[in-house]
Amino acid sequence: MRILISGASVSGPVLAYWLARYGFDVTVVERAATLRKAGGHAVDLFRPAVRIADKMGVLPLLEARNTGTEWLSIRREGSDRARELAIGKLMTAISDQHIEIMRDDLSEVFYDATLGDVEYFFDDSIAALRDHSGGVDVTFENRPAREFDLVIGADGLHSNVRRLVFGPESGFTTWIGAYLAVISMPNYLGLRGRMEGVVGVNRMAAVYGDGRLDDARGLFMFRPAKELDYHHRDVARQKELLREHFDGLGWEVPELLALVDTAPTFYFDSVTQLRMDTWSRGRVSLVGDAGYCPGPAVGGSTSLAIVGAYVLAGELAAAGGDHTRAFPAYERALGDYVRRSRTFAVGAAKRLIPGSRGELAAMMAGIRLFGYLPTPIARVVSKLGGGGLRLHDDVTVAEYAPARRESQL
């Protein structure tokens, strides 16, 4: 049974790994010319995703690439006094298992795990899809057309597959009030194992360094009064907006903004949720941010994408490749996790970026108080606090029996 996956970032290779293990014939198409390796930004893996990585045999590789960020030093706008927070204590309160890793490192580890078992088409994209009773006719931009039994979109928040099958992105996105930007930059602050930053009303900026990298990352998050007008590929406009919203914040922000134009990598996007009634139509389905992004940087989208890929592959294997049974089962199995992630993300976007001076003061006081709590007590407080702070650890990852081989499907 032939399955095409669009996207070779995180959920695509994880899905490809498990489908190949279950005996499916898997091809992955990726728009980029090569596997992206620009360092990326840091992402978090929580317990269910960590356990799936362990099942794949790649957990030691991920642990070896942990960013090693142990301390957060944050100051209030207009003040030179910084509050210190132990990242390890915070993450222990959120999840019993946690790895912070650069996104591109994560992608590379998962990609390497599929080599020899999965066919990759780089520097190409799907131009058209025709779903019919016998399969899906796929027209590529650069390669000859081919037929597949199923097509899965693992191509992110701005999914090409979703657009082709379900319609314009605007019909499914909900802006939840914030924007995120990340730049690669020289590590002129000499940061190793720590993040330093400044927070003001409706905006925050920070710098962190991965102990394994020579450079650092500049991080910006802000909440404007209304949704911004720009195209997600218009980098010049995005940089202009960033300067407008961070003017006058102080600390190292003027230097960070000066580095934006020369940054070798620049990422800018809205903190947007994907809200769809279904992620599947006919022989096509979606996985990860393409189908149910809870919001970049605020909803644990990377862990959710890994779990989603594992579940989709498992349900296809359990159904013997019958998508009419597997796709609905996949959506039922993941539905509660997706809904809870969305709810958490809306609250997290507000908590991370205080919207008033009162909220800013409360945030700084909370950081100070949390720093004094012993780790076991901090964990108990996190469980009592509500809002689904430990939502990832509440997810039970199913065990799927190995499928029959391709010749039997």
Image: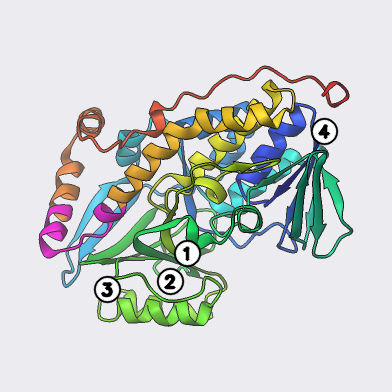
Which secondary structure, mark 1?
A: strand
Mark seen at residue 104: none
The quarter of the displayed image where residue 16 is located: top right
Q: Name the residue under label 1.
A: 216
Position of the N terminus by quadrant = top right
Q: Where does the image place residue 159, in percent across and percent down from the top left?
A: 60, 57
Q: Pointer 1: residues within 10 angstroms few (<14), some, or many (20+)?
A: many
Q: Where does the image place residue 69, in percent across and percent down from the top left?
A: 41, 49
Residue 177 in sight here: yes
Q: Where does the image place residue 88, in percent across and percent down from the top left?
A: 35, 40
Query: Callout 1, which amino acid?
Result: Ala
Position of the C terminus by quadrant = top right
Residue at screen point 31% across, 76% down: 246
Q: Pointer 4: residues within 10 angstroms few (<14), some, or many (20+)?
A: some
Q: Nearer the viewer, residue 292 or 136?
A: 136
Query: Callout 3, which amino acid?
Result: Trp
5 is within the stretch colored magenta: no
Residue at screen point 50% across, 82% down: 236
Residue at screen point 24% across, 64% down: 199
Tell me the CA gap for discs 2 and 4. 52 Å
Q: Mark 2 points at which residue?
A: 188
Query: Callout 2, which amino acid?
Result: Tyr
Q: Name the residue under label 4.
A: 1
Tags 2 and 4 in contact by the CB under 8 Å rule? no
Which secondary structure, mark 4?
A: loop
Q: Mark 3 points at which residue?
A: 251
Image: 381 above or below 131: above
Residue at screen point 30% across, 70% down: 226
Tell me the CA gap for discs 4 and 3. 57 Å
Which region shows up in magenta? 349-363
Q: Earlier in the sequence, mark 2 or mark 1?
A: 2
The quarter of the displayed image where residue 163 is located: bottom right
